[in-house]
Amino acid sequence: MSLVPITDMLQDAKKNHYAIGHFNMINMEFAQAICEAANEEQAPVILGVGEATIKYMGMDYVISIARCAAKRSRVPVALHLDHGSSFPVIVQCIRAGFSSVMIDGSHYPFEQNVELTKKVVELAHAAGVSVEGELGSIAGTEDDVTVEEKDAQLPTVEEAVSFWEQTKVNALAVAVGTAHGLYRAEPNVRCDRIADISSRVDAPLVLHGGSGVKEDIIQQAISAGAAKINVNTENQVAFAESTRTVLDHKPVIADARDFLREGRDAIKETVRAKIRLFGSNNRV
């Protein structure tokens, strides 16, 4: 298959009360693990790539690996820019072949965020690319951007409705109490806020910071209207712990494939568990 936008898969998830997994890809092993799990579970999937990964891998490698993964897949695969920081970055990714982009103007005042997002939507939709916007600020670190917990802000329902009505994004990420990275304490996820916003906007809602959130809270968020859930840290931890175990037991190992294979398998099982939790298995 070719890379696809996120629009149709998220609309189906919203309608049928499940969520699509967005899993960040930082190298070939991550892409292989994510797509192998998705294919075995018959689940649509989103490969997320942040700007730090583009700098690390190079745009040509990102596009080539994602296209290869999609071509080998029997399920819909989207390549999604995660937390795009500026209009020039969005243009670069659309031209390169991303099927979906996120413009994160959440650090700007409301009206400036709206104007930037509208500009991205106009460009992306003309190219057949879907758009995710963000409202409110989510604590934690994503790529090179850190938001302190004290600075995290949750938007009101009225702000979310106004933002969507003005921008018509295909997916809307709203801060509801989750955070990027590892949690130091139990997050207070406002599922009631998700439900209130979801009932008043057509765009499927996105839950960032899905790693480490208790399963019952995830299920409540999906029931409330979250149709896309982002997971990164749990895969990173699974990969690191698995490869570290191999290297600890075989300190003189020379073949990188031996520990990369174990790390890839660990990610695959983490993704498989999330797909089943989100209810996106057997949807293709």
Image (cartoon, grey):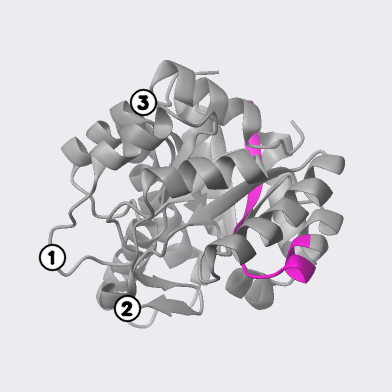
Tag shown at residue 148: 2
Q: Amino acid at mark 2?
A: Glu
Residue that extends furthest to the left in the rendered view of this protein: 185
- Residue 217 has which mark? none
Residue at 69% across, 59% down: 115
Up the image or down, 243 lies above or below 154; here it is below
Q: Secondary structure at mark 1?
A: loop
Disc 3 packing (10 Å; few <14; some 14–19; many ≥20): many
Q: Position of residue 40 (x, y in %)?
A: 48, 28
Amino acid at circle 3 = Gly
- Residue tagged 1: 185
Picture disc at residue 279: 3
Q: Which residues are magenta?
A: 74-90
Q: Give residue 243's quadrant in the image.
A: bottom left
- Regarding residue 17, the answer to whether it shows in the image is yes
> In front here: 109 or 258?
109
Please tell me whether residue 86 belongs to the stretch shown in magenta: yes
Marks 3 and 1, how far apart in space? 26 Å
Residue 191 as seen in the image, left or right of residue 64: left
Measuring from the top left, give residue 104's x and y in whole percent. Answer: 57, 62
| Residue 22 shows in the view | no
In-front residue for pair 163/255: 163
CA distance separating discs 3 and 2: 32 Å
